[in-house]
C-alpha cells in the first residue's frame, strides 16, 4: 500500500474515533447528568449569543458578498471536475436535490409557523407587522443560508478540480484515487497551511466538522420527528399522554432511519428519488393551500414579502443588537443567530453533496444556482404557507411549531380531505428529512473512510449515531437542547469557514 494511502487511512481512523468519542461523551453526559449539562450548555449559549453573535452575523454576510463576487467575476466561467466532464444530472434534478438536502423538513415546520411567531413576539422587528414577518422569515431562509453552502461546495469542487500527480497508474486506478483523502474540511485549508493540515490540527478540524454536522442534522431530524408526532397525534390520539408521545417519537425516528437506510443503499439514485417524491408532495400541498386558501391575498403576500425581504436584507444583514432592548437581543439570539449557527453546522455535508452532484458545471452556474434558486423557492413557500397561516389566524405555541401545518390544513379542509392531506404532509416530511440525513451520512462515512467508496455497514453506523443523538437530546431536553448544542458547537466551525473563504480566494488566483 502506498505511503499516501496509509497516511489517509490513519488520519481517517483518528477522525472517526475522535468524532464518535465526542458524540458519545456528549450523549453520556446528557444521560447521566442531564440538569448539569443543560445548565452548562445554557450558560454557553447565553455567552455565545451575548458576546459572539456578531461573529456569526459578520461572517455570513461576508459570505454572501464573496459568493456573488466570485460568480460575477471572470472566475465564474471556469468549469469544475475533470477536463471534459459533463453534468451527471439534469438541471431540474440537480436543483431539486440541492433544495431537498439544504432545507430538509425544517421548511415544513417553520414555513408555516415562523411568520406568525415573529408577528406575536414582542422583541421581534416584525411585531404586529404581517408584511415584515414574511420578509423576516424569508431573510432567515434566503441568501445567507445558501451562501454558506455555495462557498463550501465550491471549495470542495475546486479541490477535486485540482490536477493530481501523474504516476505509472492506469486510468481505472486514477479514477479510484480521485476522491481519496479529499473529503476533509482540513484539506480545504491546505492553500493556507500546507502539509500541516495532515497533522493533529487538521484532524481536530475534521472532528469539529463531523461533530457539528451530526448535531446540526440531529436538530433537523428532531424537528421532523416532532412534526410527525404532532400530525399523528392529531389524527389518532385525542388526548395523548407523555408515554404515548414518547413511544411515537421513538417509532418515528426509527422509521426515518429505515427510510434513510434504503436511500443509502442506492446512494445518489435513492436520494434523487426521495427528493423527487418529497418535492412533488410539497408542490401538491402548496397548490392545495393556494386553491383552498385566500389566493388573491397570497399573491399580494408574495410581492410584499419580496419587497420586505429586500428592505430587511439591507437593514438586518449586519444587525448585532448592540443598541437593542433586552427583548430584542433575546429575539436576535433565539432566531437570527441560531439560524446562522444552524446553517454553519450543515455546511460541511451540504457543501460536499453540492460538489459531488455539480461536476461538469461552471463556477457561475454552481454559485448562482445554489444561491438564487433555493432562496426564491423558500420565499415562495414562506409566502404561501406562512401567509395563509397568518391570514387564517393560525396560532401555535413556539414549543410546538410543527403543529402549525396541521392546524392550517384543518382550517382550510373538511375532515375527509384533511386526513388525506395530513398523511401527504407526513410523507413529505419523512422524505425530505431522509434526504438530508442520507446526504449527511454519506459525507460522514466518507470522512470516516478517508474519501472514496464506503461500506454499507459504516454508513449504517453513522446513521444510527446521528439518529441516536437526535433521540437522546430530544428525550433529554427537547428542541431547546438541540438548539443550544448547535449554537455552541458551530462557533469554532464558523471560524474554520472564514479560513476556507480566504484559502478559496488564494487558489482562485492561481491560473489553470
Image (cartoon, rainbow, N blue to C red):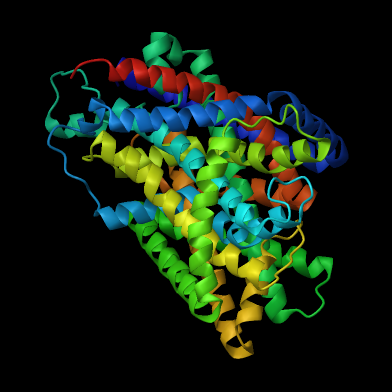
Does residue 453 appear in this view?
Answer: no
How far across and how far down the image is residue 348, in percent? 47, 35
Q: Residue at x 54, y 26 (%)?
A: 59
- Is the residue 148 above or below the residue 403 in the image? above
Q: Residue at x 65, y 79 (%)?
A: 410
Q: Nearer the viewer, residue 57 or 14?
A: 57
For the N terminus, the quadrant is: top left
Does 304 sit left or right of 390 as displayed? left
Does residue 460 appear in this view?
Answer: yes
Q: Residue at x 53, y 47 (%)?
A: 309
How far across and how far down the image is residue 275, in percent? 41, 60
For the C terminus, the quadrant is: top left
Does 180 sit left or right of 293 as displayed? left
Among the 4 quarters of the image, the one containing residue 53: top right
Q: Nearer the viewer, residue 254 or 275?
A: 275
How far across and how far down the image is residue 178, in percent? 26, 30
Among the 4 quarters of the image, the one containing residue 211: top right
How far across and how far down the image is residue 511, in percent? 20, 16
Amino acid at each position: 500500500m502506498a505511503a499516501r494511502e496509509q497516511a489517509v487511512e490513519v488520519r481517517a481512523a483518528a477522525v472517526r474515533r475522535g468524532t464518535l468519542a465526542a458524540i458519545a461523551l456528549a450523549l453520556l453526559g446528557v444521560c447521566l447528568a442531564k440538569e448539569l449539562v443543560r445548565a452548562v450548555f445554557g450558560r454557553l449559549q447565553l455567552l455565545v449569543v451575548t458576546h459572539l453573535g456578531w461573529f456569526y452575523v459578520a461572517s455570513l454576510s461576508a459570505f454572501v458578498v464573496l459568493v456573488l463576487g466570485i460568480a460575477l467575476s471572470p472566475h465564474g466561467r471556469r468549469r469544475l471536475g475533470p477536463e471534459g466532464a459533463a453534468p451527471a444530472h439534469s438541471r431540474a434534478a440537480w436543483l431539486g436535490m440541492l433544495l431537498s438536502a439544504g432545507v430538509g423538513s425544517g421548511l415544513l415546520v417553520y414555513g408555516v409557523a415562523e411568520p406568525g411567531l415573529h408577528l406575536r413576539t414582542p422583541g421581534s422587528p416584525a411585531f404586529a407587522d404581517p408584511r415584515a414577518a414574511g420578509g423576516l422569515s424569508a431573510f432567515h431562509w434566503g441568501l445567507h443560508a445558501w451562501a454558506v453552502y455555495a462557498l463550501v461546495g465550491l471549495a470542495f469542487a475546486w479541490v477535486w478540480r485540482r490536477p493530481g500527480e501523474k504516476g505509472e497508474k492506469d486510468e481505472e486506478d486514477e479514477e479510484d484515487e480521485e476522491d481519496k483523502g479529499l473529503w476533509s474540511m482540513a484539506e480545504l485549508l491546505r492553500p493556507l497551511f500546507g502539509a500541516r493540515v495532515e497533522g493533529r490540527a487538521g484532524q481536530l478540524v475534521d472532528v469539529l466538522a463531523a461533530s457539528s454536522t451530526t448535531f446540526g442534522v440531529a436538530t433537523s431530524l428532531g424537528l421532523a420527528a416532532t412534526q410527525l408526532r404532532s400530525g399523528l397525534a392529531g389524527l389518532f390520539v385525542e388526548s395523548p399522554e407523555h408515554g404515548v408521545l414518547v413511544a411515537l417519537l421513538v417509532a418515528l425516528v426509527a422509521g426515518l432511519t429505515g427510510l434513510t437506510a434504503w436511500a443509502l443503499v442506492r446512494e445518489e439514485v435513492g436520494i434523487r428519488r426521495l427528493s423527487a417524491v418529497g418535492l412533488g408532495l410539497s408542490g401538491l400541498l402548496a397548490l392545495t393551500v393556494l386553491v383552498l386558501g385566500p389566493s388573491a391575498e397570497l399573491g399580494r403576500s408574495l410581492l410584499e414579502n419580496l419587497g420586505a425581504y429586500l428592505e430587511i436584507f439591507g437593514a438586518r444583514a449586519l444587525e448585532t443588537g448592540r443598541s437593542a432592548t433586552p427583548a430584542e437581543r433575546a429575539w436576535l439570539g433565539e432566531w437570527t443567530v441560531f439560524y446562522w449557527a444552524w446553517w454553519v453546522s450543515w455546511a460541511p455535508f451540504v457543501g460536499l453533496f453540492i460538489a459531488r452532484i455539480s461536476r461538469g458545471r461552471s463556477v457561475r452556474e454552481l454559485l448562482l444556482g445554489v444561491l438564487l434558486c433555493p432562496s426564491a423557492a423558500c420565499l415562495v413557500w414562506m409566502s404561501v404557507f406562512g401567509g395563509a397561516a397568518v391570514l387564517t389566524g393560525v396560532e401555535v405555541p413556539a414549543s410546538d411549531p410543527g403543529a402549525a401545518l396541521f392546524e392550517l390544513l384543518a382550517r382550510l379542509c373538511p375532515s375527509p380531505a384533511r386526513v388525506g392531506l395530513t398523511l401527504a404532509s407526513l410523507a413529505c416530511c419523512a422524505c425530505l428529512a431522509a434526504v438530508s440525513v442520507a446526504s449527511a451520512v454519506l459525507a460522514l462515512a466518507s470522512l470516516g473512510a478517508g474519501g472514496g467508496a464506503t461500506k454499507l455497514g459504516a454508513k449504517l453506523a453513522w446513521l444510527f449515531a446521528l439518529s441516536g443523538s437526535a433521540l437522546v437530546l430530544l428525550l433529554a431536553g427537547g428542541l431547546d437542547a438541540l438548539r443550544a448544542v448547535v449554537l455552541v458547537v458551530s462557533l469554532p466551525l464558523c471560524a474554520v469557514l472564514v479560513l476556507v473563504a480566504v484559502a478559496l480566494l488564494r487558489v482562485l488566483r492561481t491560473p489553470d
